Amino acid sequence: MPNLADNKQGLYDYQILEEFEAGLLLSGPEVKAAKMGHISLKGSFVSIKNGQAKLKNMHISSYKKAKLSQKDYQPEHDRHLLLKKREIDYLLGKSKEKALTIIPISVYTTRRLVKVKIALAKGKKKIDKRQALKNRDVSREIARKLKTLY
């Protein structure tokens, strides 16, 4: 399960409540570009309309060897997520609640398929972000001291 991209900023800005796995509908050159690592999740989010989940603002650069088939290619166009109807209905209901949103966490491959891990998330306040930084620094310091002891 090689990781193709992570959404580090999303994990910093949001508190993850629940995670889901969804398939990602891509064209052939987009799959090749994604597997080469030309993908970014910064600022992307999931939108649900008319019973379809779409991933918005995910950037996949064009595949250089497929210039002819990718004329007028838009790297940030909306991409369909493959979810079950029950999951879409659940996410739609939860996203209408106050302060909840759906963000992608990571894009990875399983066998030959490209999957995206999405999460139901709640925005963090500034104090929560500071606390997360403080906890990370403390755990680094503890690990450093344990490393010098052994």
Image (cartoon, grey):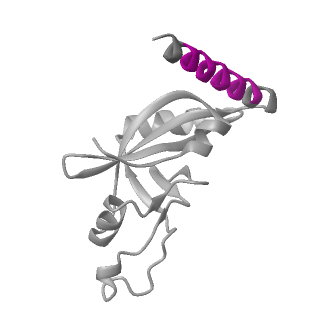
Q: Residue at x 56, y 20 (%)?
A: 144
Task: Determine whether 34 is above or below 125 in the image.
Answer: below
Q: Is residue 96 visible?
A: no
Q: Residue at x 34, y 40 (%)?
A: 84
Task: Determine whether 145 is above or below 108 in the image.
Answer: above
**Rendered-image quadrant of the C terminus:** top left
| Residue bounds of the magenta highlight | 130-145
Q: Which one is in front, 60 or 139?
A: 139
**Residue 124 on the magenta segment:** no
Considering every residue shown, the one lying at the far left of the view is 111
Q: Residue at x 40, y 75 (%)?
A: 62
Counting from the top left corner in percent of width and height, residue 78 is at 49, 63
Q: Residue at x 68, y 26 (%)?
A: 132
Q: Which one is in front, 79 or 116?
A: 116
Considering every residue shown, the one lying at the far top of the view is 149
Counting from the top left corner in percent of width and height, residue 103 is at 55, 43
**Rendered-image quadrant of the N terminus:** top left
Counting from the top left corner in percent of width and height, residue 118 is at 47, 40
